[in-house]
Structures are given as structure tokens and as C-alpha cells.
Amino acid sequence: MKTINVSEIIKNIKEMCIEANHFLTPDMDEALKNAVNTEKSPLGKQILNQLQDNLQIAGSDMIPICQDTGMAVIFMEIGQEVHFEGGSLEDAINEGVRQGYVDGFLRKSVVKDPLIRENTKDNTPAIIHYEMVTGDKVKITVAPKGFGSENMSRVFMLKPADGIEGVKNAILTAVKDAGPNACPPMVVGVGIGGTFEKCALMAKKALTRPVNEHSDIPYVREMEQELLAKINHTGIGPGGLGGTTTALAVNINTYPTHIAGLPVAVNICCHVNRHAVREL
Amino acid sequence: MDKYIKAPITDEDAKSLRAGDYVYITGTIYTARDAAHLRMYEALDRQEQLPIEMAHNIIYYMGPSPAREGRPIGSAGPTTASRMDKYAPRLLDLGLKGMIGKGKRSEAVKEAIVRNGAVYFAAVGGAGALLSKSITASEVVAYDDLGTEAIRKLEVENFPVIVVIDSEGNNLYETAIKEFGEE
């Protein structure tokens, strides 16, 4: 049994909100740098160079990479031998988000009610996903999600008869419809299988997988590579202004599903595919 | 081609711009996004005056992150323009000459751009830190209670944008994708 005081959770989540909004992970950094060299459109290359300048300024001057500092999506993988003390875990997570967004000069983009739309002024509440795992560690992933790309995300309840071609078409349709709205080059997170909500959650979590890692399942890995090539042949390009860099990665997660169904979720993220990961 | 224009923008300047032009804007522009557009729309329904002048002005669809001490503004990149499509034609008909955002526009917006000799620019989405460096001053001029969504008057210097839809209705998003698409 390991005991963690929730004050540790507050402190870490606060720091992670600020870190994720100013610095990309090394895999994203590298993918964006490489794209400058491979992009064929001169305007596309110019935009990718601007994104390099943007990242440099964000880190050195502590200005958020994007003004949409997102809704804070937080994955908590909690070892079943961990005990929390000092208060409510959920309150601690939200307090960390509050301190991170207020003290870190991040934008407050959350409204209290989806229709009445009054800003909560501290970017809470977070969207929290808990998962119980074995062991005595807590793995925290903070993934602030911007809504330019979130708005272009889709769930398709396909039929088993639609098969793998149906799945590929659904993913390509979502990407083409997203086009310039989603701030390409994008990262495409996909969930296939499970239920309506399970596939959406898998798609979201797929966005936190490093962009240079592929699925362990051979046919899924092939699909990731094939779709990335097809997406980069759509012509959408950086900023949607034409080019050969439309996506940096397609990350697909799968799960068993029902005999009658083939759910597919496509969660699109812009080039600011942010997350910070820590283990306590 | 690269062009340098002043804001507010003259009829001649607006009409001279072509889809694909890389434009540097210097002068005064205004920010407004979803909530401010809704308020302006409701004000017009009640036949009230708008808090800012539309004629010859440029609206930047943007809600900044808070400024750190000693800086005019925080991160300041464009938001998705299509959410303002419902409101834009009415503002264009009142003389609005330019809009800066990102992403596709509706047919109704394109028609209003052509009808009024206006222009739709894109700034690079997700480059808010870089774009903030072209903003030299920022002041809330209306709807202060909306926080990041308030209307701000910005002074900009060589603010970099690309013409997406010009006054003739040419659309860079449609032509550029064909140039590099391989289907």
C-alpha cells in the first residue's frame, strides 16, 4: 500500500497544465521539424517554419503555443494499491487545473452550462477519466484539448458488413471534412470497436500515444501507415492552404465489440497535440 | 505575392487583394468571436447602435490568453471562422471590409464578401505566440464582462495573413487543395 496526499496531485496537475501549454513532447517536436524538410508546397513550408518560430517563442517567452489553451482532459491511471489522503481526489484535480490556468496565464475557455454559457473563469471543471490498474503507482496525463479540432471529430456507428474499407472511408471522410478548420498538420486519434462511448474514449487516448509509435497489432499498424499516406495525398496541407503535410500521425486503438456493431470514433487534434505525463 | 496594407482598409485596397496573396496588415483592427457576435446581432435586432464602427474595419476572430505583466496581450491566434458565418453577412452589409480567422466559410458569407467588395484572410491557426508579437497594443472597448470574448481594439504592425476569399469570390482553400491533391 502506498499513500499519496492529494496536495501532491494539485501541485503536479498545476505544473503539467502550464508545461503542456508551452512545450510540446519530443516526439511532436521532432515530427514538426521533419515536416519542414519534406513539405513540397512553398507556402506550406513557410507555414511550417512559422510553427517552428511559434514553438520557439512560446518556450522562451512563456506565451502559450496556442491561445486556445483547451479544456483540461486528464487521464488518471491509478494503481489499486494506492490510497489517497488529505481530501477528495476529484477536488484536488480540479484545484490543480484552477491554479494552473489562473497562475499560468492560460485562457479560461470553459462555460458552466452548455446552453446558458457563463464562463467559469478558472477553466474548471476538467474532463477526468479514471482507470484502475495493478501496482502502487499513479500515472497522470494532462492533455489540454483545443476545440477547433475537437469540433471536427466524429463518431460513426458502422455495420459489420462495412468492414475495413468502411472504417478507412470513415476516417478519411472525417479528415477531409475537417480540412483547414482543424489547424493541420493534424494528429488523428482513432478508436475502433467497443461501444459508442468506449470508441470515443479510445480515440482521445490514442492522441496521447507518441506520434512515432505504431500499434502492436500488425493489421492495425498497416492501416495507420496506409491512412497517413492517403491523408497526406489529400492536398489539404499546413493550415489547409495546400501541401503534402496534412497529418503527422494516425494512431488507432481497438477493442472487442458486439456481434452487431462496428463503432468508429475519429478524434482530430491540431498540430498543437499537447500533453504532459508524470508518474507518482 | 507579398502586399502591405493599412487598417482600416480602403475599398481600393480590399479589391486589389487576390486569393493567395501574403499580406502584412498595419494599423487598427478589432477582435470579436462567438459571444460578441451574438451580442452585436441582438443589438441590431433591437435597432441599437453597434459598439464599434463596421465601415472599412477588419474583425479578427480571436480570444487571447491573458497577458503577462508588461506585455500587450497573451497568445493571440485565430479561431474557426465558420462559427461566425451566421452573423458575418449582416456585418459585411454594414460596411465590414475584412475578417481574419481560419477555416472554411459558408456560401452566404462568400456572396456577402463579393457583394461588398470585402476580403477573408486566414492567419496561421495555432501560431498564437508568434502572432502576438505583431500586436503592439490591446484595449477592451466593449462587452468587458465576456472576458476573453470581449471586443478588443488592437494596434498591429505587419500582422501576417493570407487572402483566402477575395472580392471576386476566389477561394484559396478550394484551389490549393487541388494543386497538391493526388486523387
Image (cartoon, rainbow, N blue to C red):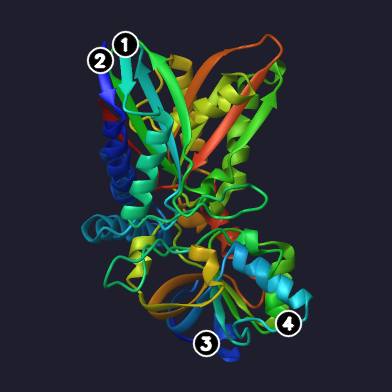
- Left or right of A278 in this view: B22: right
Q: Quick one: SS at disc 1?
A: loop
Q: How far separated are the C-alphas under marks 3 and 4?
A: 23 Å
Q: Is residue B121 visible?
A: no
The answer to the question of whether label 1 and label 2 lie on touching residues, with beta carbons closer than 8 A, is: yes
Q: Which mark is residue A2?
A: 2
At a point 52% along the width and 47% down the height, the residue shown is A149
Image height check: is B101 above or below A270? below
Res A208 quadrant in image: top left
Quarter of the image where the N terminus of chain A is located: top left
Give a yes or no on whether discs 3 and 4 share a subunit: yes
Disc 3 marks which residue? B8
**From the viewer's perspective, is the residue at label 4 or at label 2 nearer?**
2
Distance between the Cα atoms at labels 3 and 2? 63 Å
Label 3–label 2 contact, CB within 8 A: no
The residue pinned by badge 1 equals A81
Camera-side mark, 3 or 2: 2
The circle drawn on residue B48 is 4
